[in-house]
Amino acid sequence: MLCDDITLAPTADRGLSAPQTACERLKASLAQVSPHDASRSPTIDAQPTDLVSALSRAVAILSSARRPLFGGLATDVAGARALYELAAQHGAILDHLHGDTLADSNRAMQDRGAFFTTLSEVRSRADLVIVFACEPSRRYPRFYERAIGAGRDVSIVFVGCDIDKAANARTESILRETDPFDTLALWSAHVEGGRPISTPELVALTERIHSAQYTAFIYEPSTLSMKHAALAIEALQRIVKALNRTARAGALALTGDDGAASVNQTVTWLSGFPLRTRVAYGLPLDHDAHRYRTETLLSRGETDALVWISSFMPEPLPASLDDRVPAIILGHPSMQLSARKGTTVFIPVAIPGIDSGGHLFRIDTSVVAPLAAARDTGLPTVASIASRLAQAGRPS
């Protein structure tokens, strides 16, 4: 959510804390920050080395790869831009740590379009908030505080789920035991087709939407853990669009974590395609949300090198990565890699917003927030390492 009211302060053990901010997710992230991060050196096959040697081995791996995969991609806008150039040099495929969720959202947008709202609009205009089949505070602890605020006359209706205990307004829950697809099908028939339905709760809620000043639909793509999540997203968006013929409403997807929104936006404006695209200078772009899924490529042995980017948290390498596939990791300084047997180059990088400044897209993709470094470890950024690898790979 890129909350802009956070101030980080040093702790007695030379770590960082946010004393005025009650956010468990932030607390967990700061717990991974160590005063020893600045002394973490690159490694080759778990053996300490210098940065020049690590870069040289990484260049050799990329030069011999015919179909590399750039995965994880947990970085900021500058990192995404630099990685795109490097990927295009080597004909690489780009996919994010949260690629499945992104692919579902992208597919719904490509097929039917969307009617989005923003955090600012929810906070300033919405008097009715509908939370569909999710618990926002689970992954976004400050959602209600930041998106709704205190002292406002707002009603929150949870559809297909229990009431989120963190909600700070009048709340109620309907159809909590009903399958989300069934709910969406019935609601769509009523809203889009004007058909009578035997679900009085949805009929009453639709009437409330028409009486409200502005309704915000909140959903979390990652909680739609079903085979056809994209269809659920599309159905929800179609309902929102149909309601806008006679009322005012917008939808807000709670997604884009770990730089996912930033990287997806960056790759889209550079290539014209979202993530899960193979990019190569001099060749046509190739986008395929199914074929270019990280898990699919690794489990089928369809990639011969992995570049793994994990600068926000020490995300582990994919379990399906074969030891025969060499890996280049630009990662959080606290990453542990000693268990891997295959060729592995690890370069610790700066944590955006902790060790380096930068920019990230907010969850609603309407605001690009600037990041300010809270300490100086001297660790290189993802963008600087990717640029050096790209420079080394250019023909002289």
Image: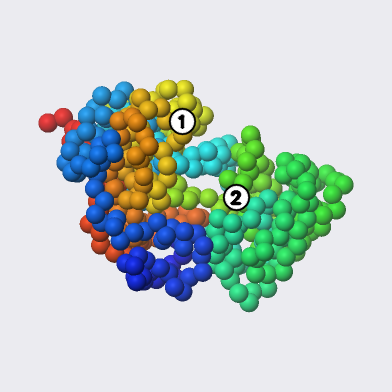
Residue at point 47%, 26% (across, down):
299
Tell me the quadrant of the picture where the C terminus can be found: top left
Q: Position of residue 57 (x, y in %)?
A: 22, 33
> Quadrant of residue 126 in the image?
bottom right
Observer-nearest residue: 353 or 84?
353
Secondary structure found at label 2? loop
- Name which of mark 2 and mark 1 comes first in the sequence: 2
The residue shown at (63%, 65%) is 166
Horizontal and vertical percent position of residue 157: 72, 60
Q: Secondary structure at mark 1?
A: loop
Amino acid at the residue labelled 1 = Ser
Q: Quadrant of residue 7?
A: bottom left
| Residue at 51 percent of width and 65 percent of height | 23
Q: How far across and down, in percent of the image, does residue 187 sit?
A: 76, 47
Front position among marks 2 and 1: 1
Q: Residue at x 46, y 61 (%)?
A: 26
| Three-letter amino acid code at the position of disc 2 | Glu
Q: Quadrant of residue 305?
A: top left
Q: Is residue 38 above or below residue 95?
A: below
